[in-house]
Image (cartoon, rainbow, N blue to C red):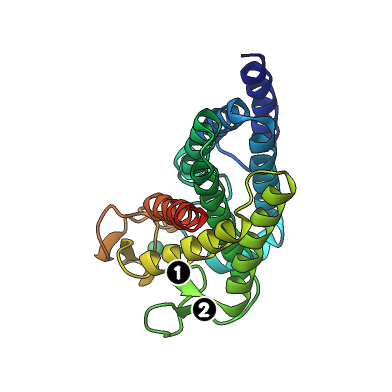
Amino acid sequence: MERALAGFLLAGAIAFAARTVRALSVGGAVAALVVGTAAAIAGWTWATVLIVFFVTSSALSRFKHAAREARIGGIVEKGNERDAFQVLANGGVFAGGAILAAGTGESAWAAAALGALAAATADTWATEVGTVSGGLPRSIISFKPLPAGTSGGVTVTGTLASILGAAFIASVSSFMGLGRASAAVFVGGVLGSLADSLIGGTIQERRWCDGCSEATERRTHYCGRATRVVGGVPGARNDFVNVVCTLVGAGVAAALAR
Ligand SMILES: [Zn+2]
């Protein structure tokens, strides 16, 4: 109970700071408060790995932010401020798994939670690094060149960043003593991020702005015009893809940890 209250206050302070520097929207800050408190209820080590994920990912988003915005601002669905759905899509599976791990003592739940976080980290690092590294993005499905920022597009640098991100969470969690399945967490993270690209390149909804004749993921283009769906499954948007990414990370890590 005391830990829940302390966790709530700590998560609140971090969410407030993140809101102040516009890393989170107001809704995103509330969602971060919920996810952070849940992690603290599971235990301080869980809260610590979550903070490590959040701080490194936010820092990477700030790195070369102007260059990224110029390259992909017209294409990507969401801006720099992470909103509530984004926070829950990236942290929800982790928080649920952490609470189940703490409640049951089952190592498979611990692996699932960490696999989900490794996948979210791998995907975030790949996006943040890949979109400013300058390499030519190619479709993970057809290998054809794609505009930077297009879902399903991968670069060599971005892929290396995703592998590093998964390895980073596997190492940090192992160092913190959260289970001994760091290889399973690493593989879960890499495969979760791979699933994100595969789904992003196939079933994720693709939209088009008739005014600018440009592909985009935004419902309203930067020109102000409403865009229309031209491919993929309507409604399968970025947050849905991120949830699948973390679920694949969780499932793979839990299966391998057994
Ligand atoms: Zn437009």
Residue under the point 63% across and 43% down: 23
Whether residue 101 is visible here, answered yes or no, is yes
Crowding around mark 2 (Cα neighbors within 10 Å: few <14, some 14 to 19, many 20+) is: many
Amino acid at circle 2:
Pro
Find residue 37 and report its horizontal and vertical position in percent: 59, 27
Q: Would you name the residue on which mark 1 appears?
A: 150
Mark 2 C-beta closer than 8 Å to ligand 1: no
Label 2 residue SS: loop
Label 1 with label 2: CB-CB less than 8 Å: yes
Sequence-wise first label, 1 or 2:
2
How far across and how far down the image is residue 48, in percent? Answer: 70, 38
Give residue 81's position: percent from left, percent from top: 57, 45
28 lies left or right of 40: left
Q: Which residue is mark 2?
A: 137
| Picture residue at 58% right of the left edge, 50% below the top | 80
Name the mark on residue 246.
none
